[in-house]
Image (tube, rainbow, N blue to C red):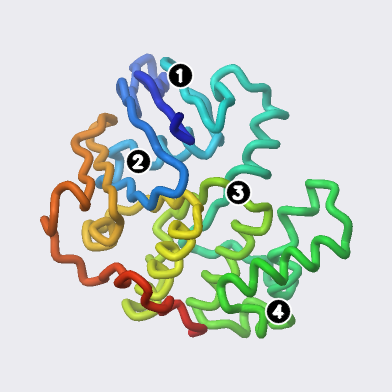
Amino acid sequence: MPLIALRHVSKIYQLGGEEIRALDDVSLDIELGEFISIIGPSGSGKSTLMHLLGCLDTPSLGTLELDGTMIQNASERELARIRNQKIGFVFQSFNLLPKLNVLQNVELPMNYSGVSSRERRERAMQALQLVDMDNRARHRPMQLSGGQQQRTAIARALVNHPKIVFADEPTGNLDTHTGEAILQLFYRLSQEGRTIALVTHDPEIAAFTPRRIEIRDGKVAQQVDAKLAGASATPRFSLPSAGSPSTATSR
């Protein structure tokens, strides 16, 4: 059973008496531990798809099942619980609170989970260790580089041990070298069993991922599995070879 299953999903908006289908009859599966990209131009429907997959919205038609829960039937309270416990979000703009230090920023998602202050601190430090940022725990966001801020945001997304992490243009504000380090980190996390979904308009970023889902005009235009398709693209980033150490060092 896939972690996420969409069956004939549409998202319909009414605009000035006109029906707009932001998504139109989309069916796809996402498995536990996959590293995928969702790619498409502006207005293609990829952001709408991410909002549905991330339980920020519900389908107008069709069914969406996430880890055994039928999302279109869930209450707002249940959706909030799923977002907090099963889903992590990483954004291009980092969204760190400037008045809080790194550790406090990472602790934030646990403030709504009834976790004790001691456990919050322990889990936040563990998440920071995963992304090589534990030595910056007392720094504030303005004291960090872009890559360090993004890794802090990734730690925050991981702190509640979600099954899936959505990253919306996560390298858009980073230089090429730092962007590659972030992508390598996502790859390592997927190898450890996390499901990682990148949302991007950049085909070179998408070519890094083992599976790519292209959205156009609200439909799945094509899906590419790199293992089956072979070297059909030449990305400027490359996956690490088996057994190679992570390149996501602190920048």
Q: CA distance from mark 2 to mark 4?
A: 34 Å
Q: Which residue is mark 3?
A: 162
Q: Which residue is mark 1?
A: 63
Q: What type is the residue that disc 1 sits on?
A: Thr
Q: Which residue is mark 4?
A: 137
Residue lying farthest to the left in this orientation: 232
Q: Which residue is mark 2?
A: 46
Q: Nearer the viewer, mark 2 or mark 4?
A: 4
Circles 4, 1 touching at the beta carbon (< 8 Å): no
Q: What type is the residue that disc 4 sits on?
A: Ala
Q: What type is the residue that disc 2 sits on?
A: Lys
How far from the left and from the top, in percent, is residue 238? 26, 70
Circles 3, 4 touching at the beta carbon (< 8 Å): no
Tell me the crowding category of disc 4: few under 14, some 14 to 19, or many 20 or more residues within 10 angstroms, Cα based: some
Q: CA distance from mark 1 to mark 3?
A: 22 Å
Quadrant of image for the N terminus: top left
Q: What type is the residue that disc 3 sits on?
A: Pro
Q: Nearer the viewer, mark 3 or mark 4?
A: 3
Circles 1, 3 touching at the beta carbon (< 8 Å): no
- Under circle 3, the secondary element is loop
| Chain-order first, disc 1 or disc 2 | 2
